[in-house]
Amino acid sequence: MNPLTKSAEHRRCSRKVYAGCRGPDGCVVWVIDGNGERKRLNPRRALRNHSPTGFEWGYGGSGPAQLALAILAEHLGDDHAALRLYQDFKDTGRQLVAVQRGNRQLPRSTVGTTTGQSAPR
């Protein structure tokens, strides 16, 4: 599809990013849409509770697993697919390479590329 003819909704969704920061209360991750509106990423502990203390990144443990699950559940809008894919997504080490390098943002397009799964429109 020609990018000039894509709908405004599609352009807004495709510019979504996941942004994280580490503070005194631990790691916080925000979903920022194409309009700049942000909301906290839901940890989705009802799907699987790896980390009651919250998100983390930079290693292969429970905090990064919770973060990978939450990102995929939000990105895909499909809990079953998120549960099937999140460990591989976490294990690739790619989901938060930007965070480890100080950028602290993960574009939605990177999530789709890493998992091979497109987000719903």
Image: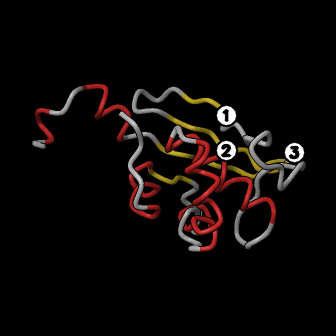
Return the disc, 2 or 1, that comes first in the chain's sequence. 2
Q: Tell me the SS state at disc 3.
A: loop
Q: Dot 1, crowdedness within 10 Å: few (<14), some or many (≥20)?
A: few
Q: Look at the picture and state if 113 lies above or below 120.
A: below
Q: Is residue 22 shown left or right of residue 103?
A: right
Please name the residue that numbered disc 1 is placed on. Answer: 40
**Alpha carbon separation for disc pair 3 and 2:** 12 Å
Assess whether mark 1 and mark 2 are in contact (beta carbons under 8 angstroms). yes
Q: Is residue 36 shown left or right of residue 48?
A: left
Q: Where does the image place residue 39, in percent across and percent down from the top left?
A: 62, 29
Q: Dot 3, crowdedness within 10 Å: few (<14), some or many (≥20)?
A: few
Please name the residue that numbered disc 3 is placed on. Answer: 25
Residue at figure coordinates x 57%, y 65% from the top left: 89
Residue at figure coordinates x 78%, y 49% from the top left: 48
Q: Where does the image place residue 120, in percent across and percent down from the top left?
A: 40, 37
Q: Tell me the SS state at disc 1.
A: strand
**Alpha carbon separation for disc pair 2 and 1:** 6 Å
Where does the N terminus fall, quadrant-wise? Answer: top left
Residue 15 occupies quadrant = top left
Assess whether mark 2 and mark 3 are in contact (beta carbons under 8 angstroms). no
Q: Which mark is residue 65?
A: none
Where does the C terminus fall, quadrant-wise? Answer: top left
- Closer mark to the observer between disc 3 and disc 2: 2
Return the disc, 3 or 1, that comes first in the chain's sequence. 3
Q: Where does the image place residue 69, in percent across and percent down from the top left?
A: 66, 52
